[in-house]
C-alpha cells in the first residue's frame, strides 16, 4: 500500500499539451528532493488538444500523478477548486501548467508556510509578460483589490501559492475568483505571507485570457464585496432578538432572495408612481422597470444554465449551446445594461421622489429631510445592484463536472 501523501501539488491545465510532461518532471525532481510523500494533481479543464492523452500516458508510469478530467471547460478557478477538493496532503501548492511558474520555488514557499502561516503567495516581481497589456493592468488591479479587500498583496493573480489544506478547503471559490483567494482566506481567519518567486515567459501554447479579463476582474471586485457580506453573515436566520441581526439576515441571505422579492414587489409601486407623477417620471420609471425585467431575465437564464447541465432536452441543449457555450457572456451583457439603467433610473427616481415625498410628508405632519429620503432610496438601489451583480457573476464553481479520475489508488481509471 502506498504511503498517504502529505504534500499535494495542484495544476490546472487547459490545452497545455507541450507543457505538461516537462512540468511534471520538474515538479517530480523538486518533490523527490524535499523527500516527503507527495502527489501531483493535474486538473484537465476540458482540453481539446492532446493534454489528457499525454497525462494518461504519463500516469501509467508515475504513481504520484493524479489526473482529473472535466467533461468540459469550466475555468481556471473551477479546476483549482477541484484540485483542492481531491488533494490528500496537509500542505497544498498550486501553480500554472504553462511552465511560467517554476517548481524550484516550492521549497521556499513551504518553508515560509511552516513559519506559521496558512497561505503563502508568490509575487512575480520580475514578471515576464507584456508590459502594457498585462503588467500595467495587473498593477492597477492589485492596488484596487488591496484597497477594496483590505488585504494588500502585490500579486493576487500569481497562481504559485502554498496553502494549509485545512484552510484552503474551507474557502468558498466563486466564478473566476481564484484571483481573490488571499482576501477570501481572511474570511476563515488565514494568516498570509508573501515571497518573491521567479517567472518565465510562455514558451509553448497560448495565454487563455485577453484584455477582456480587465472588465471581468473589475466586476469580480464588486461581486467580492457582496459575497463577503453574504459569507460573513450567517446562512440561516439566527433567530436573534438583536434587531440588526434580523435585518442583516433578511438583507444578506445567501441567495439574496430579499433583493429579488423587493425588485418584484416594487413593480406595482412604480406603475402607481407613473400615474401619480405624470410624464416627467416616465424616463425614470421605464429605466427601473427595464432594470427589473433584466434582473428577472438574468435569473431565468441562470436557471437555464443549471438545467442545461442536467437535462438532455432540446431546449436545455440549446441553452447550453448559446449561453454556457459562450461562457455566460449574455448574462454579463444583461448585467451591464441592467446596471446602467439602474443607475440612471435610480438617479432620476431620487430626484422625482424627493419632491413628491417631501410634499406628501409635509401635508401629513413629520418634516423629514431630503437627505433621509435620498439615503433610503439609495439603499434600495444598492440592493438591486447587488442582486444584479450576484446574478451576473457569483456562480459557485462547484458546478464543474468530473469525467474521469486517473490515479494509482483507483487502480487505473474510474469514471463518473
Ligand atoms: N487554465 C485553465 N482553464 C481555463 C484557462 C486557463 O485551467 O479556462 C489554466 C491554464 O492552462 C494555465 C493557467 O490556468 O495552466 C493559467 O492560464 P494562462 O497561462 O493562460 O494565464 P496567464 O498566465 O496568461 O495569466
Ligand atoms: Mg500563463
Image (cartoon, rainbow, N blue to C red):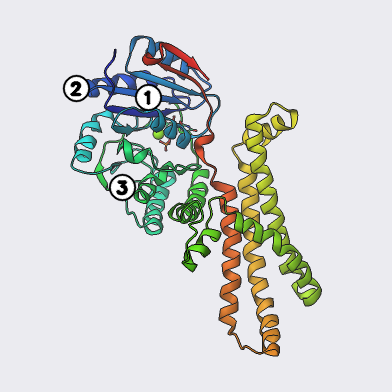
Residue 114 image point, x, y percent: 20, 38
- Depth check: give the residue in front, 131 or 305: 305
Q: Which residue is mark 3?
A: 190
Q: Which residue is mark 2?
A: 35
| Label 3, label 2: how far apart the Cα atoms are | 27 Å
Residue 377 position within the rendered picture, expressed as x and y whole percent measured from the top left: 61, 71
Residue at figure coordinates x 44%, y 45% from the top left: 133
Label 1 Cα neighbours within 10 Å, binned few <14 / some 14-19 / many ≥20: many
Mark 1, secondary structure of its residue? strand
Q: Label 1 to label 3, Cα distance in Å?
A: 23 Å
Q: Is residue 402 above or below residue 140?
A: above
For this rendering, which residue is in front, 130 or 194? 194
Please report whichever mark, 2 or 1, sits nearer to the chain's N-terminal start: 2
In the rendered structure, find residue 373 and report the number of the disc placed on it: none
Q: Of the residues tagged 3 and 2, which is closer to the observer?
A: 3
Q: Determine the residue positioned at 27% across, 42% down.
A: 118
Query: Residue 321: x percent and y percent?
Result: 67, 31
- The secondary structure type at the circle numbered 3 is loop
Q: Are marks 3 and 2 in contact (CB under 8 Å)?
A: no
User: Would residue 278 be visible to someone looking at this image?
Assistant: no
**Which residue is found at the position 70% from the left and 49% from the top?**
297
Earlier residue among tags 1 and 3: 1
Residue nearest the observer in this picture, 391 or 205: 391
Whole-number angstrom distance, CA of label 2 to CA of label 1: 18 Å
Q: Is residue 50 left or right of residue 19?
A: right
Q: Is residue 55 left or right of residue 372?
A: left
Instruction: State the residue position of label 1.
Output: 41
Crowd band around label 2 with a 10 angstrom C-alpha radius: few (<14), some (14–19), many (20+): few
Residue 131: quadrant of the picture:
top left
Amino acid at each position: 500500500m502506498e504511503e498517504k501523501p502529505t504534500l499535494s501539488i495542484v495544476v490546472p491545465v487547459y490545452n497545455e499539451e507541450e507543457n505538461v510532461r516537462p512540468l511534471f518532471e520538474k515538479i517530480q525532481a523538486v518533490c523527490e528532493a524535499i523527500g516527503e510523500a507527495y502527489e501531483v494533481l493535474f486538473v484537465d479543464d476540458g482540453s481539446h488538444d492532446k493534454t489528457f492523452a499525454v497525462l494518461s500516458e504519463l500516469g501509467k508510469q508515475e504513481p504520484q500523478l493524479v489526473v482529473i478530467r472535466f467533461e468540459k471547460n469550466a475555468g481556471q478557478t473551477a479546476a483549482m477548486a477541484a484540485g483542492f477538493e481531491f488533494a490528500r496532503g496537509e500542505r497544498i501548492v498550486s501553480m500554472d501548467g504553462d511552465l511560467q511558474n517554476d517548481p524550484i520555488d516550492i521549497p521556499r514557499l513551504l518553508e515560509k508556510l511552516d513559519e506559521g502561516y496558512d497561505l503563502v503567495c508568490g509575487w512575480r516581481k520580475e514578471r515576464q509578460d507584456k508590459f502594457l497589456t498585462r503588467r500595467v493592468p495587473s498593477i492597477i488591479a492589485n492596488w484596487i483589490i488591496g484597497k477594496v479587500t483590505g488585504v494588500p498583496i502585490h500579486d493576487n493573480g500569481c497562481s504559485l501559492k502554498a496553502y494549509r489544506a485545512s484552510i484552503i478547503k474551507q474557502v468558498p471559490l466563486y466564478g473566476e475568483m481564484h484571483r481573490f483567494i488571499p482576501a477570501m482566506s481572511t474570511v476563515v481567519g488565514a494568516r498570509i505571507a508573501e515571497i518573491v518567486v521567479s517567472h518565465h515567459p510562455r514558451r509553448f501554447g497560448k495565454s487563455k485570457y485577453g484584455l477582456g479579463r480587465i472588465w471581468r476582474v473589475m466586476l469580480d471586485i464588486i461581486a467580492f464585496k457582496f459575497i463577503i457580506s453574504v459569507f460573513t453573515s450567517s446562512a440561516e436566520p439566527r433567530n436573534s432578538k438583536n434587531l440588526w441581526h434580523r435585518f442583516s439576515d433578511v438583507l444578506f441571505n445567501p441567495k439574496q432572495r430579499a433583493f429579488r422579492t423587493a425588485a418584484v414587489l416594487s413593480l406595482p409601486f412604480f406603475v402607481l408612481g407613473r400615474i401619480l407623477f405624470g410624464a416627467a417620471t416616465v424616463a425614470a420609471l421605464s429605466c427601473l422597470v427595464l432594470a427589473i425585467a433584466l434582473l428577472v431575465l438574468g435569473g431565468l437564464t441562470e436557471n437555464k444554465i443549471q438545467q442545461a447541465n442536467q437535462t438532455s432536452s432540446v431546449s436545455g441543449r440549446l441553452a447550453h449551446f448559446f449561453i454556457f457555450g459562450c461562457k455566460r457572456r449574455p448574462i454579463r451583457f444583461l448585467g451591464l445594461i441592467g446596471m446602467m439603467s439602474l443607475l440612471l433610473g435610480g438617479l432620476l427616481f431620487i430626484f422625482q421622489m424627493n419632491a413628491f415625498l417631501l410634499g406628501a410628508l409635509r401635508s401629513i405632519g413629520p418634516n423629514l429631510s431630503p437627505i433621509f429620503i435620498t439615503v433610503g432610496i439609495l439603499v434600495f438601489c444598492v440592493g438591486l445592484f447587488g442582486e444584479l451583480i450576484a446574478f451576473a457573476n457569483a456562480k459557485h464553481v462547484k458546478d464543474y463536472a468530473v469525467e474521469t479520475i486517473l490515479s494509482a489508488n483507483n487502480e487505473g481509471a474510474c469514471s463518473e
